[in-house]
Amino acid sequence: MSLLTDLLDGHLESGVHHWHSELGHIELARLATEAGWRLVVLDTRNITDKTGFLDACREVFDFPDWTGHNYDALVDALRDVRGDAGVLVLWEGWDNLARTNRSVFDTAYGILERRNEFVPGGPFSVLLRNTNANPEH
C-alpha cells in the first residue's frame, strides 16, 4: 500500500510525512474526500518569512479575521481545524522555506507536527511533497 492510502485508511500514524508523488491536487482532493478527510494545500514556494507563512496559513485554513498574527495564535487557531475523518495538509514548497529561512521552517514544522498533541479528536497529517531538495526534516 502507498503512504497516502495507509494514512487515509488509518493504518499510518498521524503526523508529518515525506511524500514522493506527482499526484495532482484535484486527484488528491478526490481521494481525501472519498475517505472523509479534509484536504488543505499549504503552498510556501514563494514564502520566505514568518509573516508570509502565517498569512498563507490564515488563508488556506480559513482562520477568522480576528486571529492573531503570531505562532501562539497559529497554535490556537489550528485547534479548531477539523475534518470528518481527519485533516490532510499537502505542504508544497516546504523545501523553499527550509532553505531560505530555516528558523521559520523549523518552528512551522514543529507546530504542525505537534498539532495532534494539543487537540483530541480526528487525525491531522501533513504531507511534505518531496522535490530534489533534501533538508534535514
Image (cartoon, grey):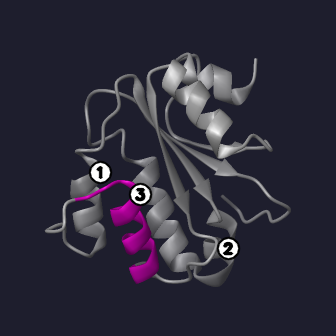
Which residue is tagged 3?
60
Q: From the viewer's side, name the closer residue of 25 and 8.
A: 25
Q: Is residue 62 magenta?
A: yes
The N terminus sits in image quarter: top right
Residue matched to label 1? 78
Q: Nearer the viewer, residue 89 or 120?
A: 89
Q: Amino acid at mark 1?
A: Leu
Q: Earlier in the sequence, mark 3 or mark 2?
A: 3
Instruction: Give the SS element for disc 1.
Output: helix
> Taking 82 as reference, is 56 above or below it?
below
Name the image quarter holding residue 67.
Answer: bottom left
Answer above or below: position of 109 versus 3. below
Q: Earlier in the sequence, mark 1 or mark 3?
A: 3
* Nearest to viewer (mark 1 / mark 3): 3
Amino acid at pointer 3: Val
Mark 1 to mark 2 CA distance (whole Å): 23 Å
**Residue 84: quarter of image:** top left
Image point (30%, 44%), residue name: 81
Q: Are marks 1 and 2 in contact (CB under 8 Å)?
A: no
Q: CA distance from mark 1 to mark 3?
A: 11 Å
Going from N to C along the chain, the mark reached first, 1 or 2, is 1
Secondary element under disc 2, as helix, strand or loop, is helix
Q: State the residue at coordinates (63%, 40%).
A: 26
Characterize the local packing of mark 3: few (<14), some (14-19) or many (20 or more) Cα atoms within 10 angstroms. Answer: some
Magenta extent: 51-63
Q: Residue at the location (30% across, 69% down)?
A: 71
Residue 135 location in percent, x, y? 73, 66
- Across and down, in percent, residue 133 comes to 81, 66
Q: Amino acid at mark 2?
A: Asn
> Label 2: which residue?
96
| Disc 1: CA contacts within 10 A as few (<14), some (14-19) or many (>=20) | many
